Structure formats: C-alpha cells, structure tokens
Image: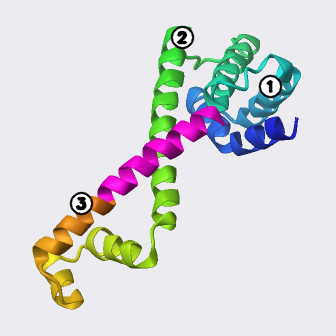
C-alpha cells in the first residue's frame, strides 16, 4: 500500500496537468482531481503493479473528466468526447517525453564531477570544443571523443532509468 501511495503522490502534478488540459482551464479541476484520487484509491486492488502507474492513473482521470462533463453538460463550452480523447492521448505522449528530461537530470547527477563539468561547459554554457580543449590542455579531437562517450553513457542510463520507471 505504501508503494501505491508513493506512486499516487508522485503522479499528482501529471494528473492535475492532464485534467486541466482536458477541461480547458475550468475552475473545477481541483474537484475532478479529488474525484480521480478517490477512484484510484478505490481501485487500488485492481492496479497491476507490473505495469506503469501513470498511464493507468491518467486513463482514470480521463474517465473522471468525462463523468464531470456529463454532470456539467448544461454548460455552453463542452468538448465532444472524441476531441477530449485526443487531448488525453496527446497529454500522455507529452508526459512520456517529460520523463526523458527527468531521466537525463538523474543520469547527469550520476556522472563523475569531471565528466559532468565537461558536459555543462559544452552543452549548458555553449563553450566550443576547441576552447574546452585549450582550457583542459588536451587535443580537440580527444575532447570530442570524450563527449561522444559521455553522450553514449547518458543515453544508456536514460534508457535504463526509463525502463525502471516503467516497472515502478
């Protein structure tokens, strides 16, 4: 149960964002989020722990938005169900991409300080490879090769991290 609570807690901002997107900024987003949390809690036993939590929770949120829409159907601006489904699907795709950025940040933290400083110099501060090589007292092609190896390590780490998140 504590793992479920942790996953639910970690998913709150994504759930809020998804609901907010599907409801086009409606003031009832917090209410629908609470309804979603209630349903997720009630369905805790139905959750398959071998599958990713967030897509399941986002699908429940989607259905809660639909239920809210039914209750509020007298409002003037109401998206049709197919458009709402497309919005939910797009949000899920974009959320998955955001996970890559989080994985990158985690993987950067795992690098040794010297490698992290090299990556920061090149990609965060925009320093030219030639300038970095001069500062380090190494050949530019050696710095390029080192940056290539670091990028490979980061890519492998991101894939591993995303796979672990998928199981979490």
Q: Is residue 101 magenta?
A: no
Q: What mark, if any, has residue 148 been given in the picture?
A: 3
Which residue was labeled with disc 2? Answer: 80
Do we see residue 28 in this rendering? yes
Q: How is the image coloured?
A: rainbow
Residue at image location 66% in from the left, 23% down from the top: 56
Tell me if residue 99 can be seen.
Answer: no
Q: Is residue 85 left or right of residue 13?
A: left
Give the answer, above or below, for where 89 lies relative to 123: above
33 or 42, which lies in front?
Answer: 42
| Among the two numbered marks 1 and 3 on one chain, the one whose residue lies closer to the N terminus | 1
Residue 65, percent from left and from top? 68, 21
Local SS, label 1 = helix
**Which residue in the structure is indicated by mark 1?**
40
The label on residue 71 is none
**Residue at image point 58% right, 20% down:** 77
Of the numbered discs 3 and 2, the one sitting upstream in the chain is: 2
**Residue 80 percent location from the top left of the image:** 54, 11
Q: Position of residue 59 (x, y in %)?
A: 64, 20
What segment carries the magenta color? Answer: 151-168
Figure quadrant of residue 151 = bottom left
**Image height of 130 relative to 11, above or below:** below
User: What separation in Å lies between label 3 and label 2 (alpha carbons)?
Assistant: 48 Å
Residue 132 position, x and y percent, is 21, 82
Is residue 144 placed above or below 67 in the rendered structure?
below
Determine the residue positioned at 54% across, 17% down. 84
Circle 1 or circle 3, nearest the eye: 3
Q: Mark 2 falls on what kind of element?
A: loop
């Amino acid at each position: 149960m504590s793992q479920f609570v942790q996953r639910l807690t970690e998913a709150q901002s994504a759930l809020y964002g998804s609901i907010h997107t599907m409801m086009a900024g409606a003031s009832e987003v917090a209410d629908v989020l609470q309804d979603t949390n209630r349903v997720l809690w009630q369905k805790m036993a139905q959750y398959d722990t071998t599958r990713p939590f967030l897509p399941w929770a986002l699908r429940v949120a989607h259905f809660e938005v639909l239920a809210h829409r039914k209750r509020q159907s007298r409002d003037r601006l109401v998206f049709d169900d197919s458009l709402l489904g497309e919005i939910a699907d797009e949000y899920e795709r974009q959320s998955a991409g955001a996970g890559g950025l989080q994985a990158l940040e985690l993987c950067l933290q795992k690098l040794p300080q010297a490698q992290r400083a090299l990556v920061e110099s090149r990609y965060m501060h925009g320093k030219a490879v030639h300038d970095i090589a001069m500062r380090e007292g190494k050949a530019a092609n050696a710095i390029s090769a080192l940056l290539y190896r670091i990028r490979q390590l980061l890519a492998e780490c991101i894939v591993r991290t995303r796979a672990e998140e998928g199981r979490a």
